[in-house]
Amino acid sequence: MLLWVILLVLAPVSGQFARTHKSIIFLQPPWTTVFQGERVNLTCKGFHLYSTQKTKWYYRYRGKEISRETQKNTLEVQESGQYGCQAQGSPLSSPVYLDFSSASLILQAPLSVFEGDSVVLRCRAKAKVTLNTTIYKNDHVLAFLNKRTDFHIPHASLKDNGAYRCTGYKETCCPVSSNTVKIQVQESFTRPVLRVSSFQPISGSPVTLTCETRLSLERSDVPLQFCFFRNDQMLGSGWSLSPKFQITAMWSKDSGSYWCKAATMDYSITSNSLRSWIQVQIPASRPVLTLSPEKALNFEGTKVTLHCETQEDSLRTLYRFYHDGVPLRHKLVRCEKGASISFSLTTEHSGNYYCTADNGHGAKPSEAVSLSVTVPVSRPVLTLSSAEALTFEGATVTLDCEVHRGSPRILYQFYHEDVPLGSKSTPSVGKVSFSFSLTAEHSGNYYCTADNGFGPQRSEAVSLFVTVPVSRPILTLRVPRARAVVGDLLELRCEALRGSPPIMYWFYHEDVTLGSSSVPSGGEAFFNLSLTAEHSGNYSCEANNGLVAQHSDTISLSVIVPVSRPILTFRAPRAQAVVGDLLELHCEALRGSSPILYGFYHEDVTLGKISAPSGGGASFNLSLTTEHSGIYSCEADNGLEAQRSEMVTLKVAVPVSRPVLTLRAPRAQVAVGDLLELHCEALRGSPLILYRFYHEDVTLGNSSALSGGAFFNLSLTAEHSGNYCCEADNGLGAQRSETVTLYITGLTANRSGPVATGVTGGLLSLAGLAAGALLVYGWLSRKAGREPASDPCRSPSDSDSQEPTYHNVPAWEELQPVYSNVNPRGENVVYSEVRIIREKKKRAVASDPRHLRNKGSPIIYSEVKVASTPASRSLFLASSAPHR
């Protein structure tokens, strides 16, 4: 079946018309009416090639519509209703109605019947029905089947169309009738149509005949054969499977009536096309053009006849006459008579003539015939022209001599004051030219003559005056000094050494017009200009005396602009200049010709000089120290007059150094209730400095100072023991001091009697010994050059090395003891320590006991006393770490 699918898709094939084919449903068994409970297989066939076909099915019965899709093209059904299908790639099929009948007698017929088919009508009965069958067509008895079930129509035709039914008898009572089946016999293929490649072919050309028809979709696999006829005579070898017939050459005898016939292979079905008339056309032969009278003298006024004729023709012929390719007129006559035209000769009739003959199959031209009319020349006309349209010296001038009538060949002569200049000959009437380059001697009268053998004819004279154009002007610039400076008076002088007056001079700066001046009698022109900075550039001038403008060479002028007073600006990485920053000094003169030399000054001392070759400003960089504070200026000089900028003051800020915190108390041993003075001072740093005081990293207060540090007073309580530090900040980064630990002495609730007395006496008796030991220990430590161990309690800023550490304090420090008593748990245990503070004569620094410990500061007394025991022990320690 693949073949008939391809035949339907590719169109036209086998004489079938191209069309889009719907899907088709085939039944198995082939009946549209079956008994209830039986099954019918539906097969859907499309007309596109797919390896696997998905098929959509549609079912409709009593208003109910259902659709489904199957992977194959078959579907088994057993319900009455209307069915449709759509194969993949094909349109929806026509609907098919199936009746699953509950009747006791049914008549079964195929879904479609075509001409020539062998058709079976089957009458089927259920139990209790006797088949003494009668077949009816259109309610008339067609045949008695008796006990048989099938009625055969061996060769279906249109006469078999009608409504069919059958009857039988029930065993107990009465006759029964089946359902009615309508049979409509269809054509297997449409009536053929004869297609002809040309109904009016030219004699000798080929013609193709095509017999086109279209098979029914259900019979698309039925092969057809074709036959072609002319005037009822079969063409070629007769019947053929090809729907085309080729006639290699058509002649006049082949004109006639053509038709074709299509038939099935067994000739059971045949169909004829309508007849078509083909008329073979015979083209006209090449015509012949004749001229009469044949030996006429071709002077103006002579009457001439042109005759055009072909040798044979079958239709009316259209004749056309041409003069030098231009159509004159046409005349439609019969072939045997030809066509003629007549006219009286004029000069315009000279040239070549030919004619064409056309009977509708293409024009045929004749051979050309020449005609020459002899005419004396008319009086020539002399005109003068120039490519520049001006007759000035050096211009190319053309003399044109023209005659409007005259037979060729014509000889032209050109004259200047009766002196021949040259001659030219031409084969036709028209214009000839003579060109030359003008000099001053070419002024005067000119004329020309024309002669074609009947005597020369002379033109009127034409006068020519030669004008001398201006030469290329020379531009000169004059200034009062060697170099042009802003404010100078510039004189521009322009002169053309040759040229007919008057001469107009134009002056330009950068192609912009400055002004103009006219010199009536020739010579030079002047233009003055007061120079500004914008007058630098290119200058030129132009001279024009109405002929051709001449432009001078370009002269460049550079106007020097004195430098303006420069502007000095500072560029730093921050708003406030700080020691260590990179400062850029930028000096720029907004006006002034380059190159410009810039000088930079600090307190009138030269820092450096920098040249700016192409103008603009210059920069000078400084890495700032405290000495760079002061007054700055810069100078700009381009060789005319140096200019100094205004003074700019720079103040270089110094970040604060690490501050020193000093604790001062009214007595050597601080106690609750004492007034403690905290003094914080940064030895370096630009004012104003903000100081902050901290106790255990809790802010106590702040104070600002221009110099000398800041103070903070504190009335001591038991909670004031602990670590103190301070912070200095002048806006350039805060610095924090080292931590100082304060121990506040005092008695617990059970410190009384001999215990307190013993402690106090022990402290006083050992004070002298501790002080001496501390001096010796400190001297040995400095002499040995030992570095202090790092304090794990210091803040991150404690590593700053800008300030000297305490062990570098000079030897003339005074020593002051500080006493601290600690009772961490409130028990009957008291830790008593005596420590040393190094105090300068001018600035006292309260050292962190831990810091002193790290520098080898001795504990001059330490006692651990337990109040609950009658016996106590006193320990003299030389360790650098306190007991806790």
Image: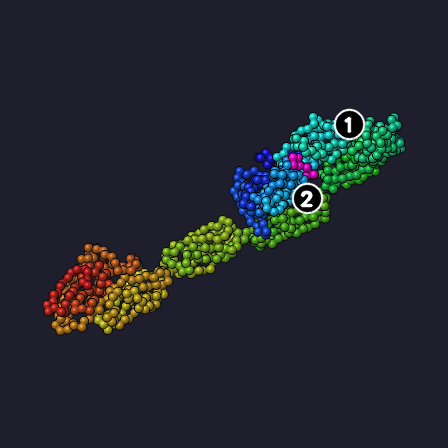
Residue 45: in magenta span = no
Q: Nearer the viewer, residue 140 or 842?
A: 140
Against 499, residue 452 (above or below) is: above
| Residues at discs 1 and 2 in contact (Cβ within 8 Å) | no
Q: Is residue 864 visible?
A: yes
Identify residue type, mark 2.
Asp
- The location of residue 716, given as percent across then percent down, is 25, 71
Find residue 39 and report its image quarter: top right
Callout 1: SS: helix
Q: Nearer the viewer, residue 609 or 331?
A: 331
- The location of residue 505, given as percent across then percent down, is 68, 48
Q: Which mark is residue 38?
A: none
Bounds of the magenta span? 153-162
Q: Residue at x 36, y 63 (%)?
A: 730
Quadrant, the N terminus = top right
Q: Which residue is mark 1?
A: 253
- The location of residue 47, given as percent across then percent down, is 59, 39
Question: Is 230 placed left or right of 225 in the picture?
Answer: right
